[in-house]
């Protein structure tokens, strides 16, 4: 015996919601990964630029060159701070989407559990009906033999 159409519809909708939530979680994870890669590039660029500055200091540096370095480093630090905020926001979105996916999955699993119970109940009812028919058949055979 199959599950009720209302429950089947609920399972189908919950599965679609779960799939959609999983896709959104995947997108959030990809965005976070990309933002972390950009942050890593910025940090690496800052390190490389600082190393070049240190090397150029040994050769002598003009005041204007030093000022340009400081201005560029300030802008680079601002970009790094901004990218760190982007990474932090992306991680928050991952957690939000993970929570939504977990809620959707929990809902889907609960509907599946209800469907399993309904199926087991129907199987038990059918087994009892089969047993009753077998008992009636055996009872009739027994009565026929006694005659």
Image (cartoon, rainbow, N blue to C red):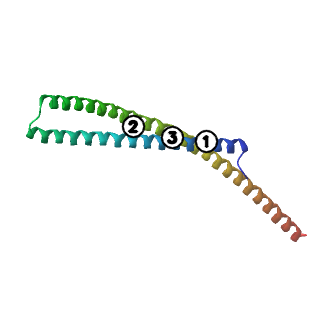
Considering only order in the chain, which callout, 1 or 3, is on the residue closer to the N terminus?
1
Residue at horizontal 35 percent and vertical 43 percent from the top: 37
Relative to 121, say whether 131 is above or below.
below
Residue at horizontal 87 percent and vertical 71 percent from the top: 145
Relative to 122, say whether 66 is above or below.
above
- Separation (CA) of disc 3 from disc 1: 15 Å
Q: Cβ–Cβ below 8 Å for labels 2 and 1?
A: no
Badge 2 is on which residue? 91
Label 1 SS: helix
| Label 1, residues with CA under 10 Å away: few <14, some 14-19, many ≥20 | many
* Residue 92 locus on image (x, y percent): 41, 34
Badge 1 is on which residue? 14
Label 2 SS: helix
* Residue 104 locus on image (x, y percent): 55, 40
* Residue 130 locus on image (x, y percent): 77, 59
Q: Quadrant of residue 109?
A: top right
* Residue 74 locus on image (x, y percent): 24, 29
Relative to 15, say whether 89 is above or below.
above
- The nearer-to-camera label among 3 and 1 is 3
Badge 3 is on which residue? 24
Q: Quadrant of residue 58?
A: top left
Residue at horizontal 39 percent and vertical 43 percent from the top: 33
């Amino acid at each position: 015996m199959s599950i009720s159409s209302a429950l089947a519809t609920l399972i189908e909708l919950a599965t679609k919601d779960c799939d959609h939530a999983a896709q959104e979680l995947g997108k959030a994870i990809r965005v976070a990964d990309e933002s972390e890669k950009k942050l890593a590039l910025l940090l690496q660029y800052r390190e490389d630029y600082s190393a070049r500055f240190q090397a150029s200091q040994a050769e002598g540096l003009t005041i204007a060159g030093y000022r340009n370095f400081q201005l560029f480093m300030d802008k680079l630090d601002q970009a790094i701070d901004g990218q760190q905020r982007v990474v932090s926001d992306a991680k928050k979105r991952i957690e939000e989407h993970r929570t939504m996916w977990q809620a959707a999955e929990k809902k889907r699993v609960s509907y599946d559990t209800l469907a399993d119970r309904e199926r087991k109940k129907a199987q038990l009812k059918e087994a009892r009906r089969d047993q009753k028919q077998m008992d009636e058949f055996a009872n009739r055979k027994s009565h026929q033999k006694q005659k």
